[in-house]
Image: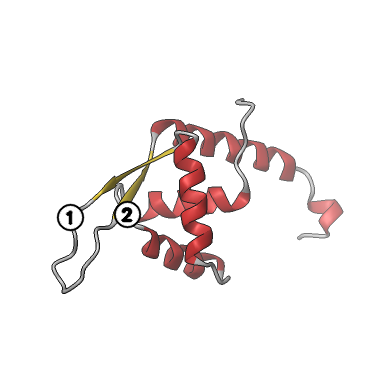
Amino acid sequence: MRRESLGEFEQLVMLAILRLGADVYGVPVVEEIEQRTSRSVSRAAVYIALRRLESKGLVSSRMADPTPERGGRAKRYFRVEPEGVELLKDSRVALLSMWQDLEPVLGER
């Protein structure tokens, strides 16, 4: 396993990108996380996480042309890089390993 680890929110952001498709901008990422986790997520938090993930080389971005509507702004589209996918897989394996055999302790049936 790699030394670097992902925080829960970073994992959620990357998983949302993967669910939504290769190139996606921030607003749908926010909506996907909110829909799937039933918790409120700020756009700022998502964009901060995206910048952090991009600086680590786990996510990349590109600027698209401005939208045609009046005053439309260019959007930055994100995609998860192969190293990011591998780190997500490593994180999943580590978490599943930690959860293994805890049912008696947690009282689950």
What amino acid does circle 1 point to?
A: Asp
- Determine whether 87 is above or below 74 in the image: above
The residue that appears at 35% across and 48% down in the rendered structure is 78
Q: Residue at x 56, y 72 (%)?
A: 40
Residue highlighted by disc 1: 65
Judge by depth and name the residue closer to the eye, 87 or 68: 68
Q: Are marks 2 and 1 in contact (CB under 8 Å)?
A: no
**Label 2, label 1: how far apart the Cα atoms are:** 14 Å
Q: Position of residue 16 (x, y in %)?
A: 44, 55
Tag shown at residue 44: none
Position of residue 61 in the picture relative to residue 16 (left or right): left
Residue 82 quadrant: top left
Q: Give the residue at x 82% y 57%.
A: 106
Position of residue 3 relative to residue 94, above or below, is: above
Q: Which residue is mark 2?
A: 24
Look at 73% across and 41% down and name the residue there.
98
Residue 38 screen position, x and y as percent: 56, 71
45, 84: nearer the viewer: 45
Numbered disc in front, either 2 or 1: 1
Image quarter (top left, top right, bottom left or bottom right) of the N terminus = top right
Q: Secondary structure at mark 1?
A: loop
Could you tell whether 67 is left or right of 15 in the image?
left
Count of numbered marks? 2
Q: Position of residue 7 (x, y in %)?
A: 62, 46
Q: Nearer the viewer, residue 29 or 102?
A: 29
Q: Earlier in the sequence, mark 2 or mark 1?
A: 2
Farthest bottom residue? 70
| Badge 1: residue crowd in 10 Å (few <14, some 14–19, many ≥20) | few
The kind of residue tagged 2 is Val
Q: Is residue 40 above or below residue 6?
A: below
**34 and 74: which one is in front?**
74
